[in-house]
Image (spheres, rainbow, N blue to C red):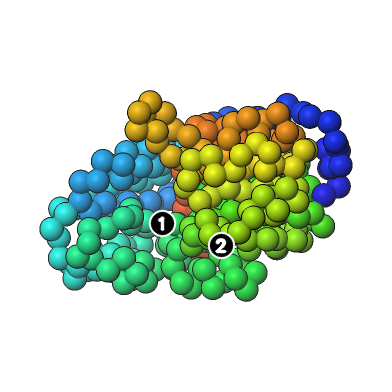
């Protein structure tokens, strides 16, 4: 990468990439877009009583309401039949007042997650996980992208981290973070290496990364001495320490003494994910109602 920190051999103290502040900025942009459009509807569906899922849904609902969206919150019983859930999704797909729809995962064991995801209208899939949207991302076409990868790219842009021609290493291969962020980085002309929890000699790859994205979900998988001096480190890990109840990342915080830029945990990627889901709802509304957008611009 062509950034000023490239090739710096001295130890550095990283600039923190503030996800809270940037997430707030994105939510303000979303609110302005909602006001321009006049209406944006976002429906969230939660099946069961998973405590973490309840927290995530409540945060999304609160953020959507604050942005002026028509936020609909469907909390359904854990023993709900799969067919009944599919009928509910079909009704939301057909509801013209709903621009964005997300079903909180994981679902109860008796429900086929893939079948549920594929039942969501791709045009309303604000989580960006429908196979149609994943395929469009693979092909480099405009589409709805999962919130975390979208948030990572917004962070890199906001802090003017150069990507073209540089080496980006993504540690993690999930369908909601690792794979999509790798494709987004490729689209920006970075050379991308994808690693994962079973990669041998992981440090051989991470030490060559100008941009390192760690998204495996394993506490401090990446130690400080595995980070290239002057690199940009995006830590997606959100791992709870059972003894201290603290949330820890996939990267040892000591890497701050080697990186040029680094996201904190918490307060880094997390706030961006919700903000970008809201941004996806606005994008979906614009794509679904282009005539309304054109009228309001004239």
Front residue of this view, candidates 288 and 140: 140
* Residue 110 appears in the rendering: yes
Q: Which residue is mark 1?
A: 100
* Residue 270 appears in the rendering: no
Left or right: 56 in relation to 38: left
Circle number at residue 14: none
Q: Residue at x 43, y 39 (%)?
A: 239
Marks 1/2 in contact by CB < 8 Å: the verdict is no
The residue mark sitting in front, 1 or 2, is: 2
Residue 206 at x, y percent in the picture: 68, 50
Front residue of this view, candidates 47 and 205: 205
Residue 162 at x, y percent in the picture: 78, 47
Residue furthest left in the image: 79
What secondary structure is marked by label 2?
helix
| Label 1 or label 2, whichever comes before in sequence order | 1
Q: Residue at x 15, y 65 (%)?
A: 81
Rendered image quadrant of residue 51: top left
Q: Which residue is mark 2?
A: 179
């Amino acid at each position: 990468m062509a950034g000023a920190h490239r090739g710096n051999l001295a130890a550095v103290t990283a600039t923190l990439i503030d996800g809270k502040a940037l997430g707030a900025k994105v939510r303000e942009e979303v609110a302005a877009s909602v006001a321009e459009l006049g209406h944006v509807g976002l429906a969230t569906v939660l099946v069961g009583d998973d405590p973490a899922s309840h927290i995530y849904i409540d945060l999304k609902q609160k953020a959507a309401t604050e942005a002026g969206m028509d936020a609909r919150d469907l909390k359904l019983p854990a023993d709900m039949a799969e067919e009944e859930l599919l009928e509910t999704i079909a009704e939301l797909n057909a509801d013209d007042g709903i621009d964005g729809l997300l079903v909180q995962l994981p679902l109860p064991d008796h429900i086929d997650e893939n079948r549920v995801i594929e039942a969501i209208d791709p045009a309303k899939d604000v989580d960006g996980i429908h196979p149609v949207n994943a395929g469009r991302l693979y092909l480099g076409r405009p589409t709805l992208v999962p919130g975390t990868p979208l948030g990572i790219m917004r962070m890199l842009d906001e802090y003017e981290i150069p990507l073209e021609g540089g080496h980006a290493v993504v540690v993690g291969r999930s369908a909601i973070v690792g794979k999509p962020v790798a494709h987004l980085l490729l689209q920006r002309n970075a050379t991308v290496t994808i690693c994962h929890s079973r990669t041998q000699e992981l440090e051989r790859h991470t030490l060559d990364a100008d941009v390192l994205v760690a998204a495996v979900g394993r506490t401090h998988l990446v130690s400080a001495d595995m980070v290239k001096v002057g690199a940009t480190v995006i830590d997606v890990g959100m791992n709870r320490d059972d003894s201290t109840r603290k949330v820890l990342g996939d990267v040892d915080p000591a890497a701050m003494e080697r990186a040029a830029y680094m996201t904190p945990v918490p307060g880094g990627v997390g706030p961006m994910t919700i903000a970008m889901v809201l941004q996806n709802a606005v994008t979906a509304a614009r794509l679904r109602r282009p005539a309304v957008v054109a009228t309001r611009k004239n």
